[in-house]
């Protein structure tokens, strides 16, 4: 009896190896994936953001000495380039960019919107440039945007030294926050990130995955759902809550954000040109992952198609105000995709979602 049993076992193993390439989640070698993300995606994205925010800060200083309409246009362009760069880095809010003590994550420190214009006016009126407060909706990219793009921006900046002083303060704060993250990644944190190859709640893979999903949720809920009036409890659109409201750049920023999520999921480098081991490869390595990735790919294409159908000749806030059908479809397709990134992928990979999104799904 021993011979037939051995043959049967061997035959079973041979059959499995020929027909089944999927492995338990714990069998995947995550270190090359983490190396790819650290070296080819995260650090380059933050470095570009550092360069763009440094340029913005420099242009603010130049404008302060010559507050002309020409200089304002240059300054606005510097802001736009920097905030576009931010879209490629805003899903890496862990490690140096995560919460630490009273300091919130980078996305909260420099990317909070909508802003509190009345509180900004109060700080300017009091010549308060210390930023020694928890009013994160009075600084960061979108407070800078407000000062540069509001209807009377040039006259205010030309006539009011306190406004220019506040602008200098918040752009310096913005640049410093990014610099701190880059220096930490270039220092000891990179080794720590690469050395944590598990999937427990404190691991690098769990942190990366959770912040990726959270970034998707923020795009869906706060860049589309909330200003479009689609969130639970809303009865109408609130288009003034959209990202990039004062500059009218909402759609461009949303497109860059969605594209950055796509690159992260598919394991592209930060330029989008080169492939590496990414979350989708990791997903395909586990039992049931190949089928899920096919379904996820199809729904993601629906998201991309819906985004491309949104008219580009009008501000996104206007389209939201009139409940334009393309905005409604975009939100619907994003909602449909939630199950893939947030629920089913998490289950197959055995990675717990550790943030509270309050998405109402």
Image (cartoon, grey):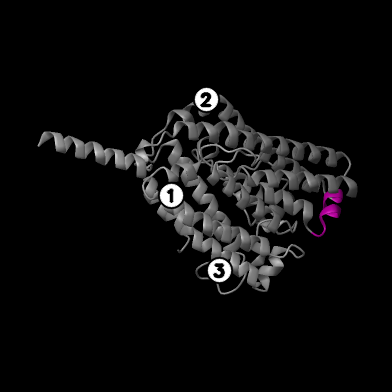
Per the rendering, the mark at residue 290 is 1
Instruction: Please provide the residue range marked out in magenta.
Output: 151-159
Q: Is residue 319 above or below residue 212?
A: below
| Residue 133 in sight from this viewpoint | no
* Residue that badge 2 annotates: 188
Lower sequence index among marks 3 and 1? 3
Task: Return the residue nearer the eye: 138 or 106.
Answer: 106
Picture quadrant where residue 230 is located? bottom right
Residue at 67 percent across and 60 percent down: it is 308
Task: Return the residue nearer the eye: 255 or 239.
Answer: 255
* Residue that badge 3 annotates: 230
Residue at 42 percent across and 31 percent down: it is 196
Residue 25: in magenta span: no
Q: Residues within 10 Å of mark 2 (few under 14, many from 20)?
A: few
Q: Is residue 143 above or below residue 58?
A: below
Instruction: Give the image location of residue 75, x and y in percent.
Output: 81, 45
Instruction: Give the image location of residue 71, x and y in percent.
Output: 87, 45
């Amino acid at each position: 009896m021993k011979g037939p049993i051995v043959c049967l076992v061997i035959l079973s193993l041979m059959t499995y190896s020929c027909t089944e390439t999927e492995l338990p989640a714990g069998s995947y070698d995550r270190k090359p994936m983490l190396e790819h993300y650290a070296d080819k995606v995260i650090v380059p994205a933050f470095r570009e953001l550092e360069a763009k925010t440094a340029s913005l800060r420099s242009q603010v200083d130049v404008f302060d000495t010559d507050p002309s309409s020409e200089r304002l246009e240059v300054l606005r362009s510097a802001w736009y380039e920097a905030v576009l760069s931010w879209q490629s880095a805003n899903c890496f809010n862990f490690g140096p960019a995560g919460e630490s003590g009273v300091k919130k994550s980078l996305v909260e420190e420099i990317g909070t919107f909508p802003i509190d214009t009345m509180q900004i006016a109060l700080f300017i009126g009091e010549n308060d440039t210390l930023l020694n407060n928890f009013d994160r909706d009075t600084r960061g990219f979108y407070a800078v945007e407000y000062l540069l793009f509001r209807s009377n921006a040039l006259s205010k900046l030309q006539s009011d030294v306190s406004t220019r002083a506040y602008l200098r303060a918040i752009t310096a704060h913005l640049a410093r926050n990014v610099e701190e993250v880059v220096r930490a990644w270039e220092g000891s944190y990179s080794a720590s990130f690469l050395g944590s190859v598990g999937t427990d709640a404190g691991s690098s893979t769990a942190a990366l995955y959770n912040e990726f999903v959270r970034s998707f949720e923020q795009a869906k809920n706060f860049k589309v759902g909330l200003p479009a009036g689609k969130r639970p409890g809303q009865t109408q659109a609130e288009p003034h809550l959209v990202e990039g409201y004062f500059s009218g750049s909402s759609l461009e920023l949303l497109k860059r954000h969605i594209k950055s999520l796509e690159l992260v999921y598919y394991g592209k480098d930060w330029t989008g040109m080169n492939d590496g081991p990414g979350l989708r490869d990791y997903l395909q390595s586990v039992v049931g992952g190949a089928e899920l990735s096919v379904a996820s790919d199809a729904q993601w294409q629906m998201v991309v198609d819906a985004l491309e159908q949104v008219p580009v000749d009008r501000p996104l806030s206007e389209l939201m105000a009139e409940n334009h059908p393309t905005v409604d479809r975009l939100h619907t397709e994003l909602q449909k995709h939630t199950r893939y990134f947030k629920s089913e992928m998490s289950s197959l990979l055995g990675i717990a979602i550790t943030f509270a999104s309050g998405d109402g799904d």
